[in-house]
Structures are given as structure tokens and as C-alpha cells.
Image (cartoon, helix red, strand yellow):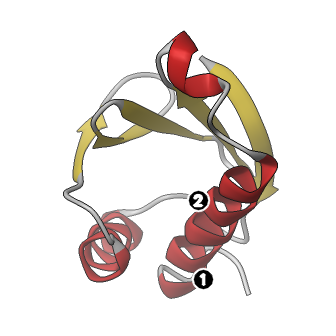
């Protein structure tokens, strides 16, 4: 699992922002995509589109975005794709009003 980036959030995660994130994922996902929340000391949103898995760990004021994919695919994931992934996460966060 590789950390892609961190993003500052304006408010902590709530039930309302979770639902807004789920709605945004469903709206903006261009390929078959699924997601799952994992509860624990730090809320975790796992977004999957085989064979890629993105994990977003939510702290009180920041979220860390991590990517996991097979080694053979990692060499195919260009910086352009990583930029698109960051833009996708920022779009989700904007729609959930976690960032401006």
C-alpha cells in the first residue's frame, strides 16, 4: 500500500458526509466500483475497482489516501493516472463539503 497524498479537511467525518461521499462515488465512478466503510479508531473508506484498491483514512482534520495495486500494474500507473485519482478524491470531498 502506497500513500498517494494527504488532504486537509474542514470538518470531521459524520454520517451526513459519509452518505455524501457514497453518493459522489456512485455519481462519478466511470468503471465498476464498490466501497466499504471499516470502523475502528480511525474511520476507513475502502474504494475498489479490481485490481486497484484505494483506502482513505479519516483523521479529525486530515485524510490520508493510499493506493494498492499489483506490482505488474504499478509500472503501468503513470503520474497522469495519479493526478486523476487525486482530482477524483478532491471532487468527492468537495461534494461532501469536507473541502472547499
The front one of 10 and 36 is 36
Marking on residue 4: none
For residue 94, the mark is 1
Q: Is residue 12 left or right of residue 18?
A: right
Quadrant of the image occupied by residue 97: bottom right
Q: Which residue is mark 2?
A: 12
Pick the residue in front: 65 or 86: 86
Marks 2 and 1: which is nearer the front? 1
**Image quadrant for the N terminus?**
top right
Name the residue nearer the viewer: 14 or 55.
55
**What is the x, y in percent for residue 44?**
43, 35
* Quadrant in the picture for the C terminus: bottom right
Secondary structure category for the residue under label 2: loop
Residue 23 lies, in percent from the top left, at 26, 77
Residue 59 location, quadrant: top right
Which residue is at 47% across, 16% downward?
70
Locate residue 36: give its quadrant. Answer: top left
Q: Is residue 58 above or below residue 16?
A: above
Amino acid at each position: 500500500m502506497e500513500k498517494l497524498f494527504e488532504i486537509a479537511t474542514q470538518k470531521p467525518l459524520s454520517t451526513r458526509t459519509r452518505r455524501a461521499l457514497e453518493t459522489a462515488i456512485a455519481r462519478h465512478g466511470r468503471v465498476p466500483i464498490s466501497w466499504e466503510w471499516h470502523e475502528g479508531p480511525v474511520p476507513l473508506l475502502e474504494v475498489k475497482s479490481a485490481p486497484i484498491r484505494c483506502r482513505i483514512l479519516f483523521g479529525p482534520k486530515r485524510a490520508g489516501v493510499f493506493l494498492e495495486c499489483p506490482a505488474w500494474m504499478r509500472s503501468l500507473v503513470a503520474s497522469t493516472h495519479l493526478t486523476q485519482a487525486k482530482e477524483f478524491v478532491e471532487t468527492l470531498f468537495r461534494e461532501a463539503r469536507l473541502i472547499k
